[in-house]
Image: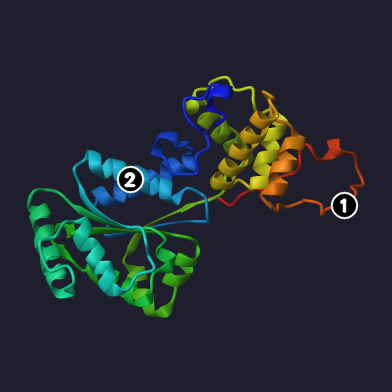
Amino acid sequence: MYNAFFGFKESPFNLSPDPAFLYRSPMHEEALANLIYGVQSRKGFIVLTGEVGTGKTTMLECLRDFLDSQFTEFAFVFNSRITADQFFEMIAYDLDLRCNRNSKTEVLFALNHMLLQQVDHGRTTVLIVDEAHNLEWEVLEEIRLLGNLENRRGKLLQIILAGQPELDRKLDAPNLRQLKQRILLRTTLFPFREDESLAYILSRLDRAGMADQTVFPMEVMHEVHRRAQGIPRVINAICDNLLLTTFAMEKHAASLSMLDEVCEDMRLEWTGRRSRGERGRYPAEAYDHPTLSSRGEY
């Protein structure tokens, strides 16, 4: 709606995980490098975790693009609230296994045959499971058993589990200690620091066609980071709504009052927010540059 008004070629803050808009922060570069290295080195199990909205699915989309470019076969399980039978059926469909896909036994035989063929041609096969924190214990155990498929040169199936921090806690359960021991690579995504949030916003505007952006003043971008708490998905949602509000008011630059309206409509909560009607002890200028807590190392 607002693209023509601001001169964008495409929407800069779409919520869909688009690798074309990937902001290559050191953290995301490291995460993607670990995923690719783990696959190429046949490490077997790789775990990617992060809070909601930190970019896990975008990392998986980037990995899928890489696997496609390398002609690497992979199965992608995007709905993790499934039974063990449904899990094997989804793998069979994604890998186009020639078997009765409703039979776990036949799927396993066909899968093993395919993996051996791939290895004979110097290739590997990848299983990607998104939202893995929702997996039932029974399905996680089946995934662990798939990790036993190997030969002298390494694992035949590279398995990537991506999920929220609950996945780490789930893998720490005593009944999954065998699976935990098989995980050789772990990588975690954290919320952005303030400088990363600003660079993220600018990179998306640049990618959309506004190299020298003027729509978001610096004070607004600082506040967007604070109110989104560094979460990329929330930054996208705020900025998209802020562009829409700016367009609706026929302005070419957003303001803090517009940001207040957007955050109110989105029912956002953030550290340091005052409740409705609460009067501050200091003038508004005192809140322009809040002190931000440091993020843990990853």
Way the structure is coloured? rainbow
**Marks 2/1: CA–CA distance:** 48 Å
Q: Does residue 147 appear in the picture of this structure? A: no
Look at the picture and state if 111 lies above or below 62.
below
Residue 190 image point, x, y percent: 53, 50
Q: Which mark is residue 63?
A: 2
* Secondary-structure class at tag 2: helix
Q: Nearer the viewer, mark 2 or mark 1?
A: 1
User: Residue at the spot x=18%, y=73% of the render?
Assistant: 104
Residue 121: x, y in percent?
8, 48
**Residue at the spot x=38%, y=58% of the render?**
130
Give the amino acid at mark 2: Leu
Q: Earlier in the sequence, mark 2 or mark 1?
A: 2
Identify the amino acid type marked 1: Gly
The local secondary structure at tag 1 comes to loop
**Toward the viewer: 180 or 75?**
75
Can you give x and y, in whole percent of width and height, for residue 265 in the image?
69, 48
Q: Is residue 146 above or below residue 54?
A: below
Quarter of the rendering containing residue 221: top right
User: Dot 1, how many residues are within 10 Å of its Cα: few (below 14), some (14-19), or many (20+)?
Assistant: few
* Residue underneath mark 1: 277
